[in-house]
Amino acid sequence: MEIEELKTIWQQYDNRLDHLEKLNKKLILETLSKKPQKKLNWIKYRSFFSIFMLPVVLTLGLHDLFRIENIDLKFIIGSLLILVFVVIISYLNLKGYMVLKGVDLSNNSIIESARKVTEFKRLFVRKRKFNLMAFPLSFAGILLISWKSFHFDSNTIIFLIGVFVFSLALGYNQLKMYKARIERLEKEIQDLNESIE
């Protein structure tokens, strides 16, 4: 065999080896990214669902109170407080969903995906802080909307305080669990990047 033929054969084998290496990396990436992709899809679904859930729940819960005879200054103030809260929360949820919508572990680079998940985490922390500050105002808004349907005595006041504390604790616990889920996803994506390299 001549040297030129050997070089050609060597080049063909080298190209095949490069192709196999790329294919192997792609298969490894697809296999390792299944678990983070499932978590990512769940968080995307939850973010999309949360855009509409708060307005629907509040509308269904308060629709009996939207009558002409209930409209007074308290009702209007309560409605404005709830409306502002719902608009801001829905906006933050939509913004978070749009960030997550751009994450695709199989097509994007791992670094780009990790950057977007980190951006979503920052949005989530901002939303969490807003929730903690605005929850008392939104609770006051619901109370003002339903003011005429309450008969305030000691049992009602204790009940409302209990509902407030329970809702705040439940919301805080849910946010804490959701944040842990985001952090696990972020860690799995970083582990995926280390595995590929």
Image (spheres, grey):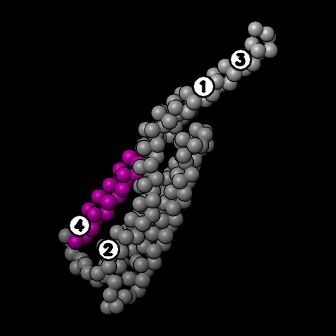
Please state which of residues 178 and 5 is positioned toward the viewer in this rendering. Answer: 5
Instruction: Report, in whole angstroms, how far the alpha carbon at label 3 lies from the one at label 4.
Output: 83 Å
Residue ID for mark 2:
60
Residue 110 on the magenta segment: no
Residue ID for mark 4:
159
Instruction: Report, in whole angstroms, how far the alpha carbon at label 2 lies from the one at label 1.
Output: 56 Å
Amino acid of disc 2: Leu
Q: Earlier in the sequence, mark 4 or mark 2?
A: 2
- The quarter in which the C terminus is drawn is top right
Instruction: Report, in whole angstroms, how far the alpha carbon at label 3 lies from the one at label 1.
Output: 18 Å
Disc nearest the viewer among 3 and 1: 3
Please state which of residues 166 and 84 is positioned toward the viewer in this rendering. Answer: 84
Q: Which residues are magenta?
A: 156-178
Amino acid of disc 4: Phe
Q: Does the CB distance between marks 4 and 2 fall below 8 Å?
A: no
Residue name at image x 21 percent, y 75 percent: 153
Which x, y percent locates residue 58? 36, 71
Residue ID for mark 3:
9
In the displayed structure, would residue 165 be above or below residue 36?
A: below
Q: Residue 162's image quarter?
A: bottom left
- The quarter in which the N terminus is drawn is top right
Residue name at image x 60 percent, y 25 percent: 21
Which x, y percent locates residue 98? 54, 57
Side of 86 relative to 193 (left or right): left
Which x, y percent locates residue 150? 25, 78
Q: Earlier in the sequence, mark 3 or mark 4?
A: 3
Instruction: Report, in whole angstroms, how far the alpha carbon at label 4 lies from the one at label 2.
Output: 21 Å
Q: Residue 138's image quarter?
A: bottom left
Residue ID for mark 1:
21
Question: Dominant secondary structure of the magenta stretch?
Answer: helix
Disc nearest the viewer among 3 and 4: 3
Q: Earlier in the sequence, mark 2 or mark 1?
A: 1
